[in-house]
Each structure stands twice: as C-alpha cells, then as structure tokens.
Amino acid sequence: MDSVSRLLRLARLRADLDKRCLLGAGTRMEVPTHGEREAPFHVLLEGTCRLQVGTVLLDLRPGDVVMIPSGAPHRVITDGKGDQVGTAEAAGDAFVTTRSEHGAEPVIDLFCGHYTFDAGTGSLLFSSLPDPVHVSFGQSAESDEVLRMLSALMRGEARREGEGTAAILSALCTVLLAMVLRTARGDTTRSTLWTAAADGRIAAAVEGMLDDPGADWTIERLSRTAAMSRATFLRHFTRDTGTTVGVFLTRARLMAAAELLATTDATVAAVAGQVGYYSESAFSRAFRAHLGTTPARFRRENSLRGV
C-alpha cells in the first residue's frame, strides 16, 4: 500500500459533498467556519472565480482544487459589474444546490464539500498540510484527463441524484483527496505537500519512516537510503517535503502511536518503545504537544477495540 492510501486509511476519513454551486456573475458566497476535525474543499469544474480565506486570495480556473485544513471561514467570489449578490439554496436528497439570488445565469460550476477525520492520524495529517492547499490539475495532460473523468462522474451522479448518490459522491471526493495529496508543488500550489515528494530518493526515505517509524532513523541511515551525501539529503528533504527530518519523523512516530493506542491493548510504555521513544515521559510530552492530550486520555476517548 502506498503512503497516501495508508494515510487516508489511518485517518479514518469520511468525505461529504455538501453543495453544487451554479453561481452567476457578481456573486459572493460566504462559507462559515467548519467543525472540529473538518476540512472543507472546493473543486471548480467550469468557469473562473476567486476564493478568499483570511488574507489569501486565490484565482481559480477549471481543474483547480482548494482544501482548507483548518476549516477557517472563507468566501467564493465571481466577477461582475455592480453590487455583489448573495446566494439561495435548494435542498436535494444528496446535497444542496446553490445559485445566485435572482436566478442569474451560471458562470461557474463548483462542487463544495468537506472531509471529516479522526483525532489521531487524521489530525496530524491535516495539521501538517499548507492552509489553504491549492492544486491545479490542468498543469499536466495526465492529471487533467483524470480530473475530467472524475468531473464527468460527479456531474452525472449529481444530475441523477438518486439512491446511492451520496455514497458514490463520497467515494469520488475521497479519490479527489488522494489526487491532491500525491500532486507535487506547481505554479498554483503555494507550499510543498510532503505527501508528494517529487524526488524518488526522498520519497524512499519518507516511505521508510512511515513503514517503520520505530527504527533508529539517523541522518546517516536516511541519506544512505536516499543514496545521497548527508548535506545533499538534508537540503533535498526540506525542499521536497517543506519540513525537516526531525519534524517529519516525530509526525510519523505519533501517527503510528495514535493507531496503536486506538486499536491495541499495548501499554503506553510499550507503544512508546514501538514507535522509537526510549522514555515514556518524552513520548507523552511529544504526544501532548502535537495532539493536545495525553496518550492515556486519547486511548479512552478514541479506542476502536471491540468496535
């Protein structure tokens, strides 16, 4: 199993398509703050618009996907003369259809939804991503073709909107996230996605730490795995992942620890040892710093044993 598939499985991800937005010119759609452990996303199938989150303003074109891991409030804006108009919603069986007030002719076709993830691996994964994530699948013929196929399926299912539509759209949105996470930085991706290391040698080191986080991963061992000198490896690792080896290794170890705490009876001390910590207290400090709770409390609140 590749690293992206493994991460999505461990994150216990659920994808929901909330709205199909067919907005006319001069429209402003406000998107409120999402709930805890929810990351909204938007995929633009047709037309152009802007998306503003905080002080960041993104220009979107067909094939662009934006995800906001923090769940922060944001707005979608279409160009047009005169005062901006709001939106009106019509509920459906599987999702809401949002249109401009006064029934303006649509200039964009935008699918909006959100990902819900768990308190362990999911929280660590989403908090490690740029905020927002902006990926354009029109950058290459291969990704553009895949997104066109995915878009056609989403549109077809949206028009059909019958039994099973919600489940099918959820599955397609999960595929979309996998595509985002494996897409390396490009012109419209402002920050590096560590899940998509472009250099195969760095990807091998990333895979090694994810596969066996408890191993003694020294810089020397990792640089040998990548067939690079120590200095070259450190420089390329930061460039390709947007983080340092130490930060990444801590993240990989805590992801593994969260899974063990949720699914096994191993003691906290045993879990600490399995993921590479020689001191239970050091493990507990790191766990609390990144997940905001102690390992014992995390287990009580998130145990999947017997589920």
Image (spheres, rainbow, N blue to C red):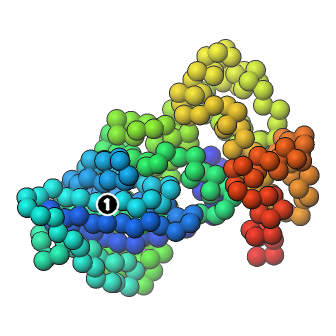
Q: Is residue 70 left or right of residue 21?
A: right
Residue at position x 32%, y 53% in the image: 52
Please name the residue shown 89% across and 64% down the image.
Answer: 265
Give the image quarter of residue 26: bottom left
Residue 159, visible in the rendered structure: no
In the structure shown, which secondary structural element does the residue marked by tag 1 occupy?
A: strand
Relative placement, left or right, of 160 versus 123 is: left
Residue 296: image x %, image y %?
Answer: 84, 62
Q: Which residue is mark 1?
A: 75
Nearest the camera: 276 or 8?
276
Q: Position of residue 18 (x, y in %)?
A: 40, 72
Determine whether, in the image, residue 75 is placed left or right of residue 103: right
Q: Residue drawn 68% across and 17% down?
A: 230
The C terminus sits in image quarter: bottom right
Give me the residue at 47% from left, 70% from top. 16
**Number of marks:** 1
Q: Nearer the viewer, residue 50 or 106?
A: 50
Q: Residue furthest left?
A: 81
Quadrant position of residue 208: top right
**Amino acid under label 1?**
Arg
Tell which of 56 and 250 is nearer to you. Answer: 56
Residue 67 drawn above or below residue 262: above
Residue 118: horizontal and vertical position, in percent?
A: 64, 63
Q: Is residue 176 above or below residue 87?
A: above
Mark 1 neighbour density, 10 Å: few (under 14) some (14–19) many (20 or more): some
Residue 8 seen in render:
yes
- The location of residue 91, given as percent across then percent down, is 33, 84
